[in-house]
Amino acid sequence: MSSFGVEVPQLPAPNGGQYAIELFKIETPHPFDQLSFKQDDEVIEHMFTASENTVSSLPVMYANIGETVENDQTEKVLLPEDYNVVGGKPVPINKLQHLGTRTRVTLKKASQTTATLHLNFHHQVLQGYETYKLGREVEVEIPYFETRKVDTVIVQKLGSWIVVGGIESKEEGSIKTSYYIIRISKPGISHRF
């Protein structure tokens, strides 16, 4: 249990000089004001403790300098991206789509106080299908998606937070906003909120 009262997994012992990379997902019905948003401890604490928010702790990942770790919360689905007409019938040309959220972190370098990381965040959801005509009589449906990506290099103070988010989704008539929170800790040191 953290000092915020949120249940979080225990960190297993790192292997040698590995850094701990913690990832949390927070869903809230009340999005934070992006213009005045500061990633300080008070805002982060509110994100974790507000009763209307749902906090999911994803598995802790470990990386040495130069290594990439990934948390893949996607469903892999083959969906048509185009069609050929063969013998008067549509034949789909399928492409593997990753629906959901995938976070990759590459630890580029680190000092006693900071870490430089490459963050690759990819979120994709199926929005619906559009109907197209192939010739006069053949109709096909092609899916379309909403995709959000972050691909950046960040210098972060060890033990501090990175917030990626503002991804809105509709569930059962209500809108939720999701934020992903990342923290990197020194080898052998566990920062618990």
Image: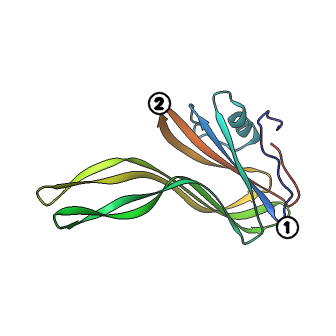
Residue nearest the viewer, comparing 112 with 27: 27
Q: Residue at x 60, y 37 (%)?
A: 27
Judge left or right: residue 170 versus residue 158: left
Q: CA distance from mark 1 to mark 2?
A: 45 Å
Q: Residue at x 82, y 51 (%)?
A: 11
Q: Residue 172 — which label?
A: 2
Judge left or right: residue 67 versus residue 128: right
Judge left or right: residue 113 versus residue 79: right
Disc with the residue nearer the chain's start (1 vs 2): 1
Instruction: Look at mark 1 in the image and give the residue it sits on.
Output: 17
User: For the residue marked with disc 2, what is the amino acid?
Assistant: Glu
Residue 91 location, x and y as percent? Answer: 27, 64
Residue nearest the viewer, comparing 48 with 42: 48
State which quadrant residue 92 falls in: bottom left
Q: Tell me if label 1 and label 2 are in contact, CB under 8 Å.
A: no
Residue 87 location, x and y as percent? Answer: 17, 67
Residue 40 location, x and y as percent? Answer: 73, 43
Does dot 2 land on a helix, a strand or a loop?
A: loop
Residue 4 location, x and y as percent? Answer: 79, 34
Q: Residue at x 83, y 45 (%)?
A: 192
User: For the residue marked with disc 1, what is the amino acid?
Assistant: Gly
Report crowding for label 1: few under 14, some 14 to 19, many 20 or more residues within 10 A (C-alpha). few
Q: For the C terminus, which image quadrant?
A: top right
Q: For the N terminus, which image quadrant?
A: top right
> Which of the two marks, 1 or 2, is nearer to us in this view?
2
Q: Residue 75 — which label?
A: none
